[in-house]
Amino acid sequence: MDVDARKLVISRLHQLNKARHATQSDKQLSKAQREAQVKTIKQEIKEIGGLNAYQHVSKTSESRYGNFNSAKWVIQQLKELDILPKQKTKVGSPRENEQIIQEQNNGEKYCTMSQASELACVNKDLKTNPNLQIDDKYFKDNVESGNIQNIKVANATVGEAWASLQAVEADEARQQDLKTSSVIELLDVGALDLNYTAYTKHIHCTSVDLNPQKPGIIKADLLEYRLGESSVFDVVVLSLVLNFAGDPAVRGDILKRAVELTKLNGHLVIVLPLACVKNSRYLTETRLNEMLDSLGCSVINSHQSKKLAFCIACKQSPAQSKSFPKTEVANGTHHNNFCIVLQ
């Protein structure tokens, strides 16, 4: 199946799923009419291949969203937030460091202190990289004697260099604490694969899906998963989950349940097709952020690729009782009708 054919399968299954939800909640139809129409829709879904077909083409055609595994972005964010340890900075050779500095500074070989820190030009022994062009002993003697006012190390004083060194040591200590800390609990909702197996030293991942395609993924509907429990996971990931649900109110319920399962000061990650927040009549990035805020979550970072929108929010307080009905917030002839309703 080529890329265009896979797109058609995904698109049609989304349409049918949405139609099924709409028909089931249509009060203008009699019970018999609803059942007959739902039966017809289910038959077409079955003929296409059902959820199995959707998951298969989603897995084999991640090209629809740029061949990007959202787990990579999740890991990157957890490292930046010091929830996971970062890879230790490697000290480049003087030649490598000089090349990097010259590229950054239009050929100038002297580096700023921030560049020196990034390149690990100053280490624990107070030795300097040749790019800083200052004598080791002179540097050390003046730091120890407190004479740090007017000595220049590249574009920074020795005092700034010393402060930078202390920051590097503090970061190393923080990373060491992370290495010895407990494993974080992560819930990967709608998992097509075991996306976090490379990080088992630091992450215990629970993967759930309506129709698991691999051993190790739990068959579960998030709305019925661990009922009666809350604040279970440090991180909850909803990657291309909200857009799969056909009913806007169900999307809102999924969002609320994900927040409920997130621990206080834990993090919720949402990934949506970019069109859901950039080209919808009923949802914008701002409105989504307002919904999350009403649920006690503050967005701390977001990112947009050519086809996807990412955000990570920290759960900082209990949810407020605020509703977000279906309301037009943008208009245009080519806008879509994607919507999330919070009741």
Image (cartoon, rainbow, N blue to C red):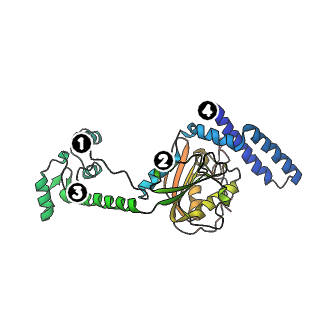
Q: Nearer the viewer, residue 212 or 120?
A: 212
SS under mark 2: helix
Q: Between tags 4 and 3, which lies in front?
A: 3
Residue 144, above or below 117: below
Residue at the (60%, 64%) spot, across then down: 260
Q: Residue 61's x, y, as percent?
A: 59, 37
Q: Would residue 131 be visible to someone looking at this image?
A: yes
Q: Residue 326's x, y, as percent?
A: 69, 56
SS under mark 4: helix
User: Which amino acid does the dot numbered 3 rest on?
Assistant: Lys
Which residue position holds label 3?
Answer: 124
Q: Check the image and name the residue furthest to the top.
A: 2
Looking at marks 2 and 3 on the same chain, the residue that comes earlier in the sequence is marked by 2
Looking at marks 1 and 3 on the same chain, the residue that comes earlier in the sequence is marked by 1
Which quadrant of the figure has residue 145? bottom left
Which residue position holds label 4?
Answer: 3
Distance CA(mark 4)–CA(mark 3): 53 Å
Answer whether labels 1 and 4 touch (C-beta < 8 Å).
no
Which residue position holds label 2?
Answer: 72
Label 4 Cα neighbours within 10 Å, binned few <14 / some 14-19 / many ≥20: few
Answer whether labels 1 and 3 touch (C-beta < 8 Å).
no
Looking at marks 1 and 4 on the same chain, the residue that comes earlier in the sequence is marked by 4
Distance CA(mark 1)–CA(mark 2): 29 Å
SS under mark 3: loop
On the rendered structure, is 15 left or right of 167?
right
Q: Would residue 326 be visible to someone looking at this image?
A: no
On the rendered structure, is 176 left or right of 264?
left
Label 1 Cα neighbours within 10 Å, binned few <14 / some 14-19 / many ≥20: few
Which residue position holds label 1?
Answer: 93
Q: Between tags 1 and 4, which lies in front?
A: 1
Q: Which mark is residue 119?
A: none
